[in-house]
């Protein structure tokens, strides 16, 4: 009963963010009919290198590797703090200490006493969204309604929600935000979490989103849920040690991961969005005619060697 | 830094479906300001018993228990099949055989050869949505835009998406659907899955949604992701055995779980929705002013003894 189901469902999902297969050797003769096929067949020029100092490589207990792409264009002060913390090896020896089902996996210093390196920026609620009133933003619009914002789209490789004055990266599955105390504390960036469930968009503009997991998401999402209040691990022996957290640019060359993201202004991305909103393969009887901003993840792929810019 | 964060985030999430704490002994003197507080303080009359023959109790390896509430009002033929399969103990000895990150955990007979009990209904695409053109449906509307449907709301304890002619239960986190082959096969109900990530709403009206997990969701969502294509467990030794799957009504009385759901026509539910869309506690600087249908789960709670109807 299910083998063809399985083939059908292949079209139904690309993980968030999508990891594409290598492009085929020969150009396709038929236009692709699934989002996955669009990604697989996208020309090389569609792909943009992600800077190695915008990638965090977190290695947790068991040698499991999680790679996070940072979003300095949207959260410059938090990202600068995170880069400084990574360079100081601040997270080494800390832990994943909270996993709450359908919400977040959170990591940092569970003792809350570890000294910070000097020079971190002070942040505020101004860091939760990017002012756009007086600038031209190259937006690829997503022309479907959203319950949380007047409009949504894509800017520079990132999903965005927007009102007339600002743009912000929404809390989608696999996206990484900054834990904080009650307002006006906006957090340093030392306490981070990744979304592991339905997008908690109510956190948008109440917390800084600083990046997204591009590899190893399942190492976070499949962790045991914590038995303490809000999913904190109790006893603390359940905490999952972080062995190291580094900028990819600071790793030995042989250990550096390299990633590319799809150009959101490309024809391939337009095709991808169209098919995300209107599934056309044999499995689907009824195309939805729309797609949520968190259900159209920007395709990201690992590449063996960093492309020459 | 994070202890108050933790208290703040308490307001930010109720698991899907929400399990409420016991009501307080004394009536509150302040109106509740968080969705969780609304649920905790809801009067007894707000809660509706869920029928024991609409609850499936699945016990998987290690004695872990998952309880699923069925939705016969929306998927009567699939639900009747599932009740028949449970009474035949059909799932005993089958397995959870697929877990794909940010998508589904799926179970059933991995060999696809196990004979079905006699008398199952034949299903079709007509079973994916409820015709509503000629009936009055008591809808509690959710007045926010949705990318997938003209309108959304709640009917008889369930979230619904609607167009002018039909209503269907959306694919939200923790919701259970019926695996199928390519169209026109709509599946018997023997192959089931639970959503473990961002709501894959593109499946709405392409697959029958038959229920939701009301207990033990983390036993599914934290399973290791399968290493095979589409998250299928390979080798098959990774499959997670299902020890038994029963209707709650067929269990010995001492083992029967009992659940209640919040009346979606109650003032408490109206308060709950309002606060889900507009967080007001100290943690939130900026209420969203809206909420997605999959981010306002109908509160469900376990109760020690089935209420007399």
Image (tube, coloured by chain):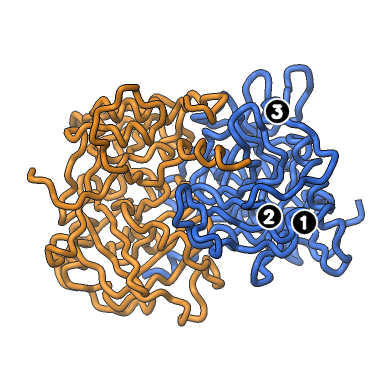
Chain colours: A blue, B orange
Discs 1 and 3 lie in a common subunit: yes
The quarter of the image holding the N terminus of chain A is bottom left
B298 relative to A219 in the view: left or right: left
- CA gap between label 1 and label 2 equals 8 Å
Give the residue pinned by disc 2: A214
A147 relative to B55 in the view: left or right: right
Question: Which is nearer the eye, A59 or A195?
Answer: A59
Identity of the residue drawn at 62% across and 22% down: A163
Q: Mark number for residue A109? A: none
> What x and y, as percent, mark residue A123?
73, 31
Identity of the residue drawn at 77% across and 49% down: A46
- In this rendering, which labeled residue sits more in front, label 1 or label 3? 3
Residue lying furthest left: B308
Q: Give the answer, above or below, for where B83 lies relative to B72.
A: below
Give the residue pinned by disc 3: A124
- Crowding around mark 1 (Cα neighbors within 10 Å: few <14, some 14 to 19, many 20+) is many
Instruction: Give the number of callouts.
Output: 3
Identity of the residue drawn at 70% across and 57% down: A41
- CA gap between label 1 and label 3 equals 31 Å
Secondary structure of residue under mark 3: loop
Q: Give the answer, above or below, for where A251 lies relative to B204.
A: below
> What x and y, as percent, mark residue B183?
38, 58
Residue lying furthest right: A308
- In this rendering, which labeled residue sits more in front, label 2 or label 3? 3
> What x and y, as percent, mark residue B213?
33, 54
Along the polypeptide, which appears first: circle 1 or circle 2?
Answer: 2
Instruction: Please say if the residues under marks 1 and 2 sit with CB atoms less than 8 Å apart.
Output: yes
Along the polypeptide, which appears first: circle 2 or circle 3?
Answer: 3
């Amino acid at each position: 009963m299910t083998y063809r189901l399985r083939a059908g469902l292949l079209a139904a999902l690309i993980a968030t963010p999508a990891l594409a297969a290598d492009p085929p050797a020969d150009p396709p003769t038929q236009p692709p009919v699934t989002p996955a096929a669009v990604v697989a067949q996208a020309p090389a020029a569609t792909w943009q290198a992600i800077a190695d100092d915008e990638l965090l490589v977190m290695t947790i207990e068991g040698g499991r590797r999680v790679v996070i792409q940072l979003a300095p264009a949207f959260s410059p002060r938090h990202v600068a703090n995170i880069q400084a913390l990574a360079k100081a090896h601040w997270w080494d020896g800390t832990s994943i200490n909270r996993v709450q089902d359908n919400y977040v996996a959170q990591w940092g210093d569970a003792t809350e006493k570890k000294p910070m390196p000097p020079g971190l920026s002070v942040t505020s609620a101004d860091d939760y969204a990017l002012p756009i009133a007086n600038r031209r933003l190259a937006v690829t619009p997503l022309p479907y309604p959203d319950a949380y914002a007047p409009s949504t789209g894509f800017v520079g490789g990132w999903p965005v929600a927007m009102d007339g004055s600002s743009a912000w990266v929404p809390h989608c599955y696999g996206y990484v935000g900054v834990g904080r105390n009650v307002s006006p504390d906006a957090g340093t960036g030392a306490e981070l979490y990744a979304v592991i469930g339905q997008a908690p968009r109510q956190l948008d503009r109440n917390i800084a989103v600083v990046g997204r997991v591009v590899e190893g998401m399942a190492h976070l999402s499949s962790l045991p849920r914590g038995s303490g209040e809000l999913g904190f691990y109790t006893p603390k022996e359940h905490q999952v040690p972080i062995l190291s957290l580094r900028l990819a640019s600071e790793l030995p060359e042989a250990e550096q991961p390299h990633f590319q993201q799809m150009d959101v202004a490309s024809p391939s991305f337009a095709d991808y969005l169209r098919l995300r909103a209107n599934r056309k393969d044999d499995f689907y009887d009824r195309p939805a005619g729309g797609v949520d901003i968190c259900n159209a993840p920007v395709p990201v792929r690992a590449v063996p060697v960093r492309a020459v810019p």
